[in-house]
Image: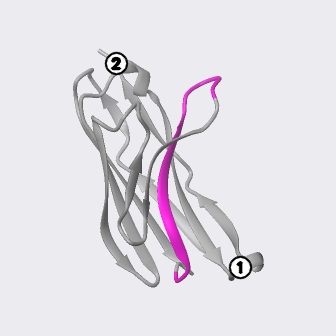
């Protein structure tokens, strides 16, 4: 089993910065990636940024010039990533969720399981 815990949300003025932390713990030996998604009221949950266990980051176009994702710590039973958000805008307001993807098996038997955190609210408002 994998536990995913987020922290670091809050209220910030436009142009401000926040850092979100996500820790995946438990049976993370087969961890493939950790990613951040966000969901605004009435909208779907969309990918913001993801980083693989070998450290390769991918950020969506809407945030790639303002957000960074980095690995803080990595071992077989605990992994932590940081999402640094700069120059925040009201459109960034959403609940931010961390996802841990576990991949097991090989070839046709390869399958993944996603674990989610409870979410953390980010509000950008003056």
In this figure, which residue is indicated by the disc labeled 2?
125
Label 1 residue SS = helix
The answer to which quarter of the image holds residue 82 is bottom left
Residue visible at 52% across and 83% down in the picture: 29
Residue 8 vertical position relative to residue 72 in the rendered view, above or below: above
Indicate how the structure is coloured in the image.
one colour
> Quarter of the image containing the C terminus?
top left
Q: CA distance from mark 2 to mark 1?
A: 48 Å
Q: Residue 88 in magenta?
A: no
As displayed, is residue 37 above or below residue 99?
A: above
N-terminal of the two: label 2 or label 1? 1
Q: Quadrant of the N terminus?
A: bottom right
Residue 118 vs residue 14: left or right?
right
Residue at label 1?
Answer: 107
Task: Tell me the residue at 71%/76% (across/down).
Answer: 110
Q: Secondary structure at mark 2?
A: loop
> Residue 99 falls in which quadrant of the image?
bottom right
Q: Residue furthest top?
A: 126
Asked if the residue at tag 1 contacts the one at tag 2, i.e. Cβ–Cβ closer than 8 Å, the answer is no
Please name the predominant secondary structure of the magenta segment in the image. Answer: strand
Category of crowding for the residue at label 1, using alpha-carbon neighbours closer than 10 angstroms: few (below 14), some (14–19), many (at least 20): few
Q: Return the x and y of residue 65 as percentages of the image width and height.
A: 28, 35
Residue visible at 47% across and 61% down in the picture: 34
- Can residue 1 be seen in the rendering of this structure? no
The residue most toward the right is 108
Left or right: residue 75 compared with residue 47 = left
Mark 2: few, some, or many residues within 10 Å (few <14, many ≥20)? some
Q: Which residues are magenta?
A: 29-43
Q: From the viewer's perspective, is residue 66 above or below residue 79?
A: above
| x and y percentages locating residue 42 in the rendered image | 65, 23
């Amino acid at each position: 089993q994998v536990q995913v815990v987020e922290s670091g949300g809050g209220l910030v003025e436009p142009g401000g910065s926040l850092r979100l932390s996500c820790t995946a713990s438990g049976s993370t030996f087969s961890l493939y990636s950790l990613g951040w998604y966000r969901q605004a009221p009435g909208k779907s949950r969309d990918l913001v940024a993801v980083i693989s266990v070998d450290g390769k980051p991918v950020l969506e176009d809407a945030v790639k010039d303002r957000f960074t994702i980095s690995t803080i710590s990595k071992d077989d039973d605990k992994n932590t990533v940081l999402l640094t958000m700069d120059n925040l805008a009201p459109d960034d307001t959403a609940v931010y969720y961390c996802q841990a993807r576990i991949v097991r098996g090989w070839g046709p038997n390869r399958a993944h399981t996603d674990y989610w955190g409870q979410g953390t609210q980010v509000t950008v408002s003056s």
